[in-house]
Amino acid sequence: MSPQQSDRPSPSHDLTATADSSRIMLQKIAAADVETVFRELTTRPLGLSVVEVKSRLKTYGPNLAGGQERSTFLRELWDKLKNPLNALLFGLAGLSWLLSDLRSAFVIATMVVLSIGLSYIQEHRSSTAAAKLANMVRVQVSAKRQGLANVDDEGFAAIPLDGLVPGDLVKLSAGDMVPADVRLCSANDLYVNQSTLTGESMPVEKSADPIPPGDRDLLSLPNICFMGSSISSGYGTAVVVHTGDATSFGTLARQIMAADTETSFDRGIRSFSWLMVRFILVMVPLVFLINGLTKHNWWEALFFAVAVAVGLAPEMLPMIVTVNLAQGAMAMAKKHAIVKRLDAIQNFGAMDVLCTDKTGTLTQDRVVLKLHLDVAGLNDDRVLEYAYLNSHFESGLKNLLDIAIQEHAELEDHLSVEGGYQKLDEIPFDFNRRRLSVVVERPDRKAMLICKGAVEEVLAVCVNCRTSEGFRPLDETQRAKVATVTSKLNGDGFRVIALATREDAEPQSSYRTDDEKALTLQGFIAFLDPPKETAAPALSALAASGVAIKILTGDNDLVTLKTCRDVGLAVTGVVTGREIEGMDDAALGDATEKANVFAKVSPQQKARIIAALQAKAHVVGFLGDGINDGPALKRADVGISVDTAADIAKESADIILLEKNLSILNEGVLEGRRVFGNIVKYIKMSASSSFGNMFSVLGASVFLPFLPMAPLQVLANNLLYDFSQTTIPTDTVDEEYLQKPRKWEIGNIMRFMLFIGPMSSIFDYATYATMLYVFNAWENPSLFQTGWFVESILSQTLIIHVIRTTKRPFIDSWASPSLIASTVIICAVAIALPYSPLAAVLGFQPLPLLYWPIVASFLIGYAVLTTIVKTWFIRKWGV
């Protein structure tokens, strides 16, 4: 086995182990010379043999990113079914069916199936993301192997990309996608766009020279090119180090394909479901035993216990949640935001930290020439003219900086470029000099050399500088002034290029690098990736809504700090990817609480930062648009993509903004809080009602010689009460509720249930006393059951209006027209049932006239008492 093979992780390793092993191998290869690299990878300049290729394909598999097994329909369906509340409801439906209560069984099962079906349709997207990742790299690559046909002059021929193996030799040219993680063997003016992995819009220089050994940032290795990146200009040859899932791109693909992380919403629903399951599992057997022992009819007690279980179970929860979320999704669609996963809306509202990439989300992801300055840092049009002439006459593939310069097309006419200037020669760019010169003949027929390049390299060939006072020697004093100007520009996040000229260039047939001497420094041009106009107000609005902003970017810290200033984000601390490498989870968690800028971070580090914030009990959103953002989008409680995002980012995201207006973010947050507010209304009402009814049922079961309510009456009661709550998704939410993030607080819901639930029992027992001692229902079970049925429906239904707001109901806050209508309708039905043809079916009988004023007084007292307790509760524990 070759050294490369021994370092390569097996498929059974997890993603972290794979990434660490690949990183160590790449750093080792980057520090070696080409001959040593060939020995390490057991290859040779002529390429691998057919036998070697077959063996390595068997060992490493095809060169495809994301070879993970895709989830099946049954697996995804099971993920939905295993919610404890769904399991409980299906169990109750099955028990009802066994007891021949087909109506209850059908109603419960139908609601759960509808909820699961809607959720499945909304969330079925992981396989699509995987397919898109694979399609991105299913191309052909130019490789050198022994025995290939149709080879070119250099011995390279086209082969399918998925057939590439470690040790293969490949050729890279402008426009090619890098087919694997490769070590360069030769490079000529090679620029690589790594934005898919780093988020940086500018291409980076690559060379074949070995680097000093050491633990360096993987994506900054100058002689390594990565799968998924592309060649912007130049050409070179390389040897394949890693293929498929072992590549950096493959690690990203596997993370994006992985199952969604459990979000804040998932945890909240699961916690509440288990709370209700535990409550039911304790209380229902008690009801069964008490009624069996006191009534001596165990079969009737069993029917009643099942009916009570159905009444206690919040079977409408899946439907209420789904309808709330679907309505929120429609509202957001009207604001040009598409919701791909419904529960992301609630996570949006609960979000208290928004992590965002910089490039393409806060910035426009394009290079703009912002400044053209003289050596003193003052605006100078002549510097821009020199830059334009240099870029105009430069041959070969122009980079983003040249394109930005040539956007000043008005200079072509102003300078009379075509008629007044003639190109004499060019000294092309190379990695050692880091500068490029063109020699032009001016309108006065004199030759002029114009040089542009990296500041230090241009200064190295300058002896003078042009100032507002004339030409000055570029002595130490002037160099210090120049350094101050360029340092300030770099500190402001600008990418700076120096311009120098030699006005008296000697006419000659050709020019060489030796002619770049005795130049005069003219000044500098500075470039920025400008922020989006909507970024600053959007981030300000989010901050006002209680959402902290943290920047996670692959770009450097200076550029990032400039962007932060541009969008009005105060920086509380900066952490780099290199610093994160040395942190354990605890240290990273502390760092994420203090700092809000994380620069030069890898895709895996972005996901790790989000996980650290989640471990600190934050609900985290992530806004990104590149392939490199995929793991973070998957890891976040809510993943958001924008504008012209990469397809994979869109597939990984939960919410996609269709406009560049980032103010939609804050509107989405508020919509999420409205949705969550209405869900919590149902949960609080359902939980407190169930707890209060349980007290009432237990007490009545102890002293009554008959069932306090017949099983069919319990189910009818439950059905009417549930129907009254189906309009909750239409309800308004108090403005005060929208002012800060709202999270699941199961402890608070339990306290609310314990304090508010018994309020209803007080008036239930008052109703018992009325029916037994005022209307003498001891010997008339039907009259007792009718009286409690009507009081129970009226009290539960009307109390919705007390619980739905922190304010005084019907005075300071009114429900939506739909909720008011459903309340009135259900109350009217409950009042009418004892006098309707259904009375005999349900076991009801008409109620005495005196019953109505007594019950009305109970309802008023119940509303007043609950309002008082609710107000006290909110002051003590909050909403």
Image (tube, rainbow, N blue to C red):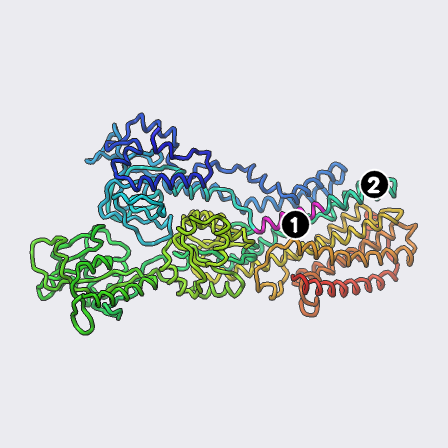
305 lies above or below 689: above
Q: Does 138 sit left or right of 612 as displayed?
A: left
Residue at 23% over, 67% down? 375
- In front: 249, or 471? 471
* Most common SS among magenta residues: helix
Q: Mark 2 points at which residue?
A: 300
* Residue type, mark 1 in image: Phe
Image coordinates of residue 754 in percent, x first then y, are 73, 55
Q: Inspect the magenta stretch and tell me whether residue 274 lies in it.
A: yes
Quadrant including the C terminus: bottom right
Q: Mark 1 points at which residue?
A: 272
* Residue type, mark 2 in image: Glu
Instruction: Look at the numbered disc 1 and give the secondary structure of its residue.
Output: helix
Instruction: Look at the numbered disc 2 and give the secondary structure of its residue.
Output: helix
Q: Magenta residues, as a range?
A: 264-278
Quadrant including the N terminus: top left
